[in-house]
């Protein structure tokens, strides 16, 4: 095999990372919620493992402006030809401009390096508007058609938010690290960190597919001398079926509703504030203001004061509501996120409610919740935490549980343990008929995949939905909210809930922290529906 000539992923400067995170969530709120492409490199204390787990996908349906800064007419034509292969399968389009500002700016030179920023990172750096966000360093008029196809399609995959497939969490490539490091040191002048970041580190990326695709345009060719046991991957020059399916799912033609709110939609995480509010439109207009259930799914709170956060909705109209995420007293809330589920106020299937503890610490609280009207059979019930007030003098521990579900109500248990002081907590609940078609709900927790006393930043597992339960037409949605946590109080409380590989058969769930947070345990509830 010919020696690989490879690209690198451009990294946002350290002093611009908070801005990059903010603009990613503002551009596409889904980047702060479930199905996103951003994520930390797995394991260790690498800079990426310490980063905020924010996605980098563009907003669905966007017309992305692209300016080619230089190059010959032939190369420019090839760039437009092969870049547009992606938009044949995605709800995106490119607008090619000859002057002025552009989302993506393409440079052609002979410096031997090809690279691109990933997704919305194209918008988030200090480069002047005439400087490139993508570079092709070896394309010439004499380049082969295969080389045009391979390099251009690959780089524009990065620009749309795709990661290197050889760095997929599902990849188990038996690298010969000594040979790999030597090769990229000799040919690209890369140090070990750069090689690991672009070649061998697996990324805890939230993608739509869990299987490793050796046919992907996003994978490097891998010669056998770079691996153990003769493992090899050939040059790929076109989109694989998995590439097409991924980009179509990431940017679907019917669009995606972001049932949630993240404070980074209205302010950067490094500019904490007590209040964050956003007016959110519903996906439909109701005859009367609907009922809303709101649950926390993201927390980044400073350790030096009590953990105080509350997510709620008010000013509810038939087609919209105000979502709030607030803190109070001396708490510093860097960022937080919530999800929300809305149903008609006169629904004869769904019931919703809210319950809060008294403003005094106690270990265990148990209350019987009565439905407004009884079901014919015991229904399904799920809960989400949406308010917390916990002392910072001990680890933060809380757990909300549903028990003893009957036709007329259920028992809600809201507990802490050990030396934690839980001053206050609030929970929303949703009930619906157990045999309702097109709806599935359930819970998952970290102790399903590891012991609580072996903390780690990234945690995940698989939920299988009942066969046939989600059959039918319509967009599949998954909403996830927090039901419990156990996090050390010697660092900031940082937690994110998310899911990927979502289909009518099931989903991969993730409960992640970042930086120096010690995540012992956490749990969540989900609802999936058509």
Image (cartoon, helix red, strand yellow):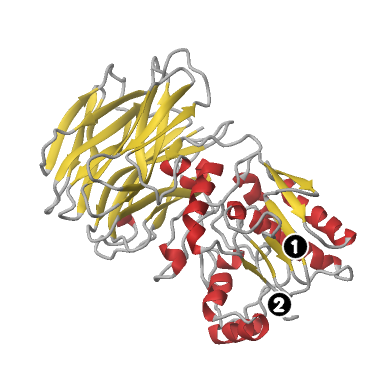
Binning the other alpha carbons within 10 Å of mark 2 as few (below 14), some (14 to 19) or many (20 upward) gives: some
Q: Which mark is residue 70?
A: none
Expressed as whole percent of the image width and height from the top left, the position of residue 530 reads 51, 32
Expressed as whole percent of the image width and height from the top left, the position of residue 53 reads 45, 55
Q: Which residue is mark 2?
A: 4
| 471 vs 105: above or below | above
Q: Under tag 2, what secondary structure?
A: loop
Residue depicted at x 56% and y 60%: 211
Q: Nearer the viewer, residue 285 or 275?
A: 275
Farthest-out residue, front: 128
Expressed as whole percent of the image width and height from the top left, the position of residue 409 reads 23, 25
Residue depicted at x 28% and y 65%: 454
> Where is residue 386, by image quadrant?
top left
Q: Which mark is residue 107?
A: 1
Tell me the quadrant of the picture where the N terminus can be found. Answer: bottom right
Q: Under tag 1, what secondary structure?
A: strand
Give whichever of discs 1 and 2 has the lower sequence position.
2
| 112 vs 393: above or below | below
Q: Is residue 210 visible?
A: yes
Expressed as whole percent of the image width and height from the top left, the position of residue 179 reads 59, 86
């Amino acid at each position: 095999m010919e020696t690989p000539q490879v690209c690198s992923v451009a990294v946002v400067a350290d002093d611009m990372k908070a801005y990059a995170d903010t603009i990613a969530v503002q551009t596409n709120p889904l980047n702060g919620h479930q199905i996103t492409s951003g994520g930390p490199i797995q394991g260790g204390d690498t800079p990426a493992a310490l980063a905020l787990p924010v996605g980098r996908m563009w907003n669905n349906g966007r017309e992305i402006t692209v300016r080619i800064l230089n190059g010959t007419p032939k190369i420019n034509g090839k760039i437009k030809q092969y870049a547009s292969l992606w938009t044949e399968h995605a709800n995106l389009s490119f607008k090619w401009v000859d002057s002025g500002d552009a989302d993506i700016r393409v440079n052609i030179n002979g410096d031997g390096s090809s690279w691109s920023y990933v997704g919305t990172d194209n918008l988030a750096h200090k480069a002047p508007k005439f400087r490139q966000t993508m570079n092709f360093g070896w394309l010439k008029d004499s380049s082969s058609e295969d080389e045009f196809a391979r390099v251009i399609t690959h780089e524009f995959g990065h620009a749309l938010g795709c990661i290197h497939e050889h760095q997929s969490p599902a990849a188990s490539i038996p690298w010969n690290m000594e040979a790999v490091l030597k090769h990229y040191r000799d040919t690209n002048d890369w140090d070990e960190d750069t090689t690991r970041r672009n070649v061998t580190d697996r990324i805890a990326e939230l993608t739509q597919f869990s299987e490793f695709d050796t046919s992907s345009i996003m994978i490097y060719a891998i010669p056998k001398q770079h691996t153990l046991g003769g493992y090899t991957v050939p040059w790929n020059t076109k989109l694989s079926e998995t590439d097409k399916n991924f980009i179509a799912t990431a940017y679907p033609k019917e669009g995606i509703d972001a049932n949630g709110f993240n404070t980074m939609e209205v302010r950067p995480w490094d500019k904490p504030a007590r209040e964050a509010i956003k007016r959110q439109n519903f996906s439909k207009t109701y005859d009367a203001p609907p009922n809303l259930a709101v649950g926390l799914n993201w927390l980044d709170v400073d350790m030096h004061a009590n953990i105080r956060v509350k997510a709620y909705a008010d000013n509810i109209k038939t087609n919209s509501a105000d979502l709030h995420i607030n803190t109070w007293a001396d708490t510093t809330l860097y960022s937080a996120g919530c999800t929300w589920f809305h149903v008609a106020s006169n629904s004869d299937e769904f019931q919703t409610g809210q319950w809060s503890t008294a403003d005094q610490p106690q270990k265990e609280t148990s209350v019987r919740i009565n439905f407004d009207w009884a079901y014919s059979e015991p229904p399904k019930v799920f809960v989400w935490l949406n308010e917390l007030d916990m002392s910072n003098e001990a680890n933060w521990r809380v757990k909300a549980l549903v028990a003893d579900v009957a036709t007329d109500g259920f028992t809600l248990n809201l507990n802490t343990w050990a030396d934690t002081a839980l001053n206050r907590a609030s929970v929303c609940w949703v009930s619906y008929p157990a045999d309702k078609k097109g709806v599935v709900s359930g819970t998952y927790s970290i102790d399903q995949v590891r012991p609580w006393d072996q903390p780690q930043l990234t945690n995940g597992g698989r939920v299988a939905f009942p066969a046939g339960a989600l059959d039918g037409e319509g967009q599949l949605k998954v909403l996830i909210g927090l039901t419990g946590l156990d996090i050390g109080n010697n660092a900031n409380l940082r937690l994110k809930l998310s899911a990927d590989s979502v289909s009518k058969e099931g989903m991969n769930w993730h409960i992640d922290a970042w930086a120096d947070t010690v995540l012992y345990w956490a749990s969540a509830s989900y609802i999936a529906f058509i």
